[in-house]
Image (spheres, grey):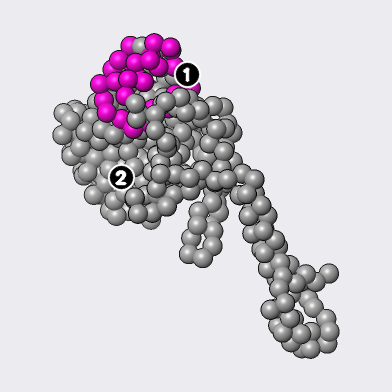
């Protein structure tokens, strides 16, 4: 069966039929059907928008841009307090939820422009908050806060000292919520239980690109030691912690971690060496001792220069995917200088 989307296609169809003695191929019919269903899908979308109006945002990335969200935010979280959510807020929330879902233990994270500027795992939530904030208290100003634990009053009192845009948690103690509601524009959200789709879509040029979400989270058994020196238990925990964060950090990305605390990151750089230098500089700015810290990279090191810089800064263990034609240079440097290096075999670019 041949499906026609528009009378404007008649001349093309007639010409096609003449050239093929009145016959059409399966490829021809698929192409015409695709155009026809393209038209009908736009019609169905228009009907959907009529019965389910889109979420009109305050504006887009900037005030001169219109922003619209098509979806059901109420399934993801409930807004308990504060002003309407913006376009940029949604981007940060998407990144924040993806990051916090990596952790089973009590964790607090602070995000700015889709990147974590603070993150820590601790048995007590208030300690996780304090150590997450210590990672970069300057960038945390006006950020998006997220945790996988219930916000208690002690933690809320500490959080209330910071100006932030949004906080998202699975639950709040009544006294904690009352404390956080002291600022009228502060957005307080309660996260619901929602299973996100395993596919991602993004508009590109005159179409849409689609891919599987990066759902790979490395575990201890995924690590392949490339040096004679093996990571200690503490280093292994820190390496896995760092790898979770670097996976959700804009490429090129380097993450530095010590005792399950993000102490610095280099994000969105065009050079991996620059990302590392940025991370080291930030760690030193906030007086972190890099001796015994670990480093995670979202992709391989093309040369041994990054490893050498990390070594001189005090870093003792490195996690990376591997895959460079010059991997051996980095491995040899680590072996010669007593550093630990493990490969995961999985690259985590995030553009």
- Looking at the rendered structure, the number of numbered marks drawn on it comes to 2
Residue 127 in the image: state x and y as whole percent.
32, 16
Instruction: Give the residue number, with chain letter if any, for mark 2.
Output: 267
User: Left or right of 218: which side holds 10?
Assistant: right
Percent position (x, y) of residue 268? 31, 49
Q: Magenta residues?
A: 154-183
Residue 195 horizontal/vertical position (percent): 59, 33
Q: Determine the residue positioned at 34% across, 50% down.
A: 63
Q: Does the magenta segment cover residue 334?
A: no
Where, by quadrant of the figure, is residue 164 drawn? top left
* Label 1 Cα crowd, 10 Å radius (few <14 / some 14-19 / many 20+): some
Residue underneath mark 1? 171
Q: Residue at x 42, y 36 (%)?
A: 84
Quarter of image, res 166: top left
Give the crowd class for mark 2: few <14, some 14-19, many >=20 residues within 10 Å: many
Closer to us: 57 or 216? 57
């Amino acid at each position: 069966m041949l499906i026609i989307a528009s009378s404007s296609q008649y001349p093309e169809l007639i010409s096609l039929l003449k050239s093929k003695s009145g016959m059409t191929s399966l490829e021809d019919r698929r192409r015409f059907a695709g155009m026809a269903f393209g038209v009908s899908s736009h019609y169905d979308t228009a009907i959907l928008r009529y019965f389910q109006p889109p979420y009109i945002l305050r504006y887009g990335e900037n005030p001169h841009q219109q922003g619209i969200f098509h979806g059901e935010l109420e399934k993801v979280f409930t807004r308990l307090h504060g002003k309407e959510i913006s376009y940029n807020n949604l981007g940060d929330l998407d990144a924040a939820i993806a990051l916090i879902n990596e952790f089973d233990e009590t964790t607090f994270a602070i995000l700015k422009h889709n990147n974590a500027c603070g993150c820590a795992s601790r048995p007590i939530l208030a300690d996780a908050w304090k150590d997450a904030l210590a990672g970069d208290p300057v960038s945390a100003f006006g950020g998006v806060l997220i945790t996988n634990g219930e916000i208690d009053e002690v933690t809320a009192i500490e959080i209330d000292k910071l100006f932030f845009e949004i906080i998202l948690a699975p639950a709040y103690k009544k006294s904690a919520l009352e404390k956080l509601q002291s600022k009228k524009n502060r957005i307080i959200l309660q996260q619901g239980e929602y299973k996100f789709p395993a596919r991602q879509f993004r508009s590109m040029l005159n179409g849409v690109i689609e891919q599987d979400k990066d759902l790979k989270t490395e575990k201890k058994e995924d690590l392949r030691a490339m040096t004679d020196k093996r990571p200690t238990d503490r280093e292994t925990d820190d390496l896995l912690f760092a790898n979770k964060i670097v996976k959700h950090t804009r490429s090129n990305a380097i993450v530095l971690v010590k005792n399950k605390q993000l102490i610095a990151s280099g994000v969105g750089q065009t050079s991996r060496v620059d990302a590392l230098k940025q991370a080291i500089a930030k760690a030193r700015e906030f007086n972190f001792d890099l001796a015994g810290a670990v480093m995670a990279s979202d992709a391989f090191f093309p040369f041994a220069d990054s490893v050498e810089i990390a070594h001189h800064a005090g870093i003792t263990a490195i996690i990376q995917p591997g895959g460079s034609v010059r991997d051996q240079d980095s491995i040899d440097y680590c072996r010669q200088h007593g550093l630990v290096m493990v490969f995961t075999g999985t690259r985590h670019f995030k553009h």
